Amino acid sequence: MRGSLALAVVFLAPLLKACQPATKPPSPPAAPVHDIAYSTLDSRQQALFFTYPSVSATNGSVYGTNPLNLSRRVEFAGGIQALELAAEKATNLHTVTAVAAIHGSEPRAASEDQFNNEVVWDKDAAAQIRNLRHWSEHIALLHPGQYGYQENRDGNPFLGLVDLFDENPANPCSRAGSFTSDSGHSSATTRLKMGISVTPMTTSSMQRGMATLGALCHSNRLGLLFVA
């Protein structure tokens, strides 16, 4: 009896295995990010890059490499694309009219002075962004003299854009301020959760410089910025 049962198991095992659904093989690891090519910037990113001090259409591709380092290039390109998708597309407004400064990984600077773009906002930007769905007021304790709004991507107040505006603008037709794409600022958890590898810059400070990518890749919203 036992012998017959064992023999049946031997013959049935291959059949049972064949009936099991095929498992999908794991995806190969993503190729390391070597750089952000100037040619991959969309027309909106390029137009704003030309407003950056000392940059023009004739020297943009060169200036993008020097003096801007990889961390600052990531912050600009990823940040502007996030702004396009989360704010400008939703409001049908070019919310930013110029870029004044780009801050990436700056180890000696305070958290609030890293990983952000200083910009000149359109005069209607704050009112338009304030009314966007899922956005809420941002408590700007680290930014005296400013107020702002945060995106709350996927219902999470620590993911998404934070847009800051000067309370008393010198020019009534525009308003200075800044934005960052991670409301946790220099939170290592958010910035490194995608495990992005950078070659040849692989120091921990440069990995933190990939801040913009954490929130963007979380929702697969980053498309054509990177070349391997």
Image (spheres, rainbow, N blue to C red):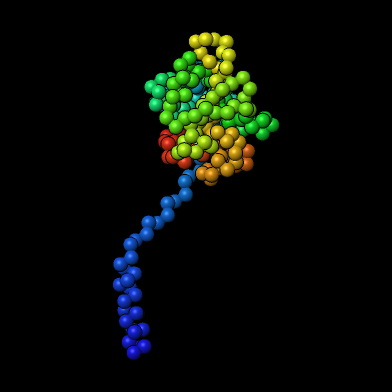
114 vs 130, left or right, is right
**Nearer to the camera, 82 or 52:** 82
Residue 53 at x, y = what percent? 56, 17
Residue 32 at x, y = what percent? 51, 43
**Location of the N terminus (image quadrant):** bottom left
Q: How many marks?
A: 0
Residue 134 at x, y = what percent? 44, 32
Residue 57 in sight here: no
**Nearer to the camera, 106 or 21:** 21
**Nearer to the camera, 146 or 218:** 146
Q: Residue furthest right?
A: 108
Q: Is residue 28 above or below residue 151?
A: below
Residue sitting at 31 percent across and 76 percent down? 12
Residue sitting at 56 percent across and 39 percent down? 191
175 vs 15, left or right, is right
Residue 160 in sight here: yes
Residue sitting at 54 percent across and 28 percent down? 138
Q: Residue furthest bottom?
A: 1
* Displayed quadrant of residue 113: top right
Residue 194 at x, y = what percent? 51, 44
Residue sitting at 60 percent across and 39 percent down? 187
